[in-house]
Image (cartoon, grey):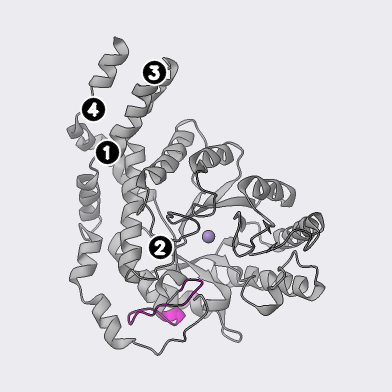
Amino acid sequence: METAKRLCAAKPFASYFSGKIMEQHFALLDGFKIEIPSWGFADTGTRFGKFLQKAAAHTIDEKLEDAGLVNRLTGACPTVAVHVLWDFKDGESPSETAKIAQKYGVQIGSINPNLFQNQEYKFGSCTSSDETARQNATQHVLDSIEIGRATGSDLLSLWFADGTNYPGQDDIIARKKRLETALKTWHDAMSESMTMLVEYKPFEPAFYHTDIADWGMSAFLCQKTGPRAKVLVDTGHHLPGANIEHIVAFLIDEGLLGGFHFNDRKYADDDLTMGSIDPYAVFRIFHEIHNAAHRGADVSSIAYMIDQSHNLKPKLEAMTQTVCVAQELYLKAALVDREKLAHFQKERDITGAEETLKSAFWSDVSPILEAWRQSRGLPKNPLAALRESDEISRRERERNHVSSGGGYA
Ligand SMILES: [Mn+2]
């Protein structure tokens, strides 16, 4: 009876707008930053081809200009992830790139080495049985750590395309040991302020085994590597049906969650925009983070990042839409009435507990977001503001480079 009354007594929506609660929501939104990737503004492709857009960014200057615009519209993405091979050229000073970022009101964020594009990595990078490939991979990441130093970045984000395509192709344990050696070398070369993020993926481009196939392998490797190695969860890097929020909760509790690469998927690593297929899944991830914070866990250093490929959607629209969706779902997850939830869990009232989550998920948070944006001098609706502006058409006129086809980015 008591339980039924609690369930029926839904929190009146107006209570979300009371002064103190509104202040809490504003503080939450002020603290929520999400990093956008430079490659999200460039022409990218599928395994079958690259589709070009006239307004796409080609140079690092253009990519940072676009990132700066998304940050000005949303107030939530002050840092930009960069890809070493695509964004830095030999002979160019990385600190100059940091200055360009500054010009557009953003900073260089996570440094992403490229250990997959060169021919020498055909059989793997730091796991390869070819010593030259291993040495080059090691040196490339050491150079990337230096780029981090020069640009003021404290995140090194590692993803390995390493794996094999056929049973027996290479010795799995020997590859594991080579990987451990490389991770340790890089970890020890990083400054104290830098964190190494280790991403995992079950398959693709390798189709028999991937050297870091899942979060557990990543977590083991991080623990062996050192205290500044943490797991990076890319939401598209799981087999269908994986319970990502469970992985997230587990990693937070073990102090091993480094951050996220957000994107959405329908089938595999589709790199669709966040929340476009399953917004409730993103909500559940944020719910576990808020829940851990409520229990006293320090979640302040979790790196929220976007890793998407905008092959068809206009890139600036896709990115602005993504950041707004992230803010919306983060806020909705914060509305979960945790006292009520704890009560239902204690009573083993499954329906009541589930409804507590759902009522937060279905809450319309747009009035809160609009009020926060207005108070921070941001457009009430960043996506609408972008679409009404001439930012994209101006880029179409001014850029319209002849882009090279082929390749991913
Ligand atoms: Mn990723």
| Front in this rendered view, residue 28 or 217 | 217
Element assignment for label 2: loop
- Disc 4: which residue: 11
The disc at residue 124 is none
Q: In the rendering, which numbered label is found on residue 349? A: 3
Residue at horizontal 20 percent and vertical 73 percent from the top: 389
Residue in the foreground of this view, choosing between 205 and 316: 205
Q: Are marks 2 and 4 in contact (CB under 8 Å)?
A: no
Circle 4 or circle 3, nearest the eye: 3
Question: Given the image, on which type of amino acid does mark 4 rest?
Answer: Lys
Verify whether residue 50 appears in magenta.
Answer: yes
As helix, strand or loop, the secondary structure at mark 4 comes to loop
Compared to residue 290, the image places residue 219 above or below, namely below
Q: Could you say which disc has been placed on residue 78 in the image?
A: 2
Residue 337 shows in the view: no
Q: Which residues are magenta?
A: 45-61
In the foreground, 165 or 108: 165
Quick one: label 4, few (<14), some, or many (20+) residues within 10 Å? few
Q: Label 1 is placed on what type of residue?
A: Trp
Q: Which residue is mark 1?
A: 362
- Residue 127 found in image quarter: bottom right
- Point 41% across, 14% down: residue: 347
Mark positioned earlier in the residue sequence (4 or 3): 4
Residue 21, x across and y down, in percent: 27, 36
Upstream in sequence: badge 2 or badge 3: 2
Q: CA distance from mark 4 to mark 1?
A: 13 Å
Q: Nearer the viewer, residue 56 or 302?
A: 56
Q: Is mark 2 within 8 Å of ligand 1?
A: no
- Mark 4, mark 1: which one is toward the viewer? 1
Is residue 137 shown left or right of residue 215? right
Q: Is 159 on the left or on the right of 100, as rendered? A: right
Q: Of callouts 4 and 1, which one flags the residue occurring earlier in the amino acid sequence?
A: 4
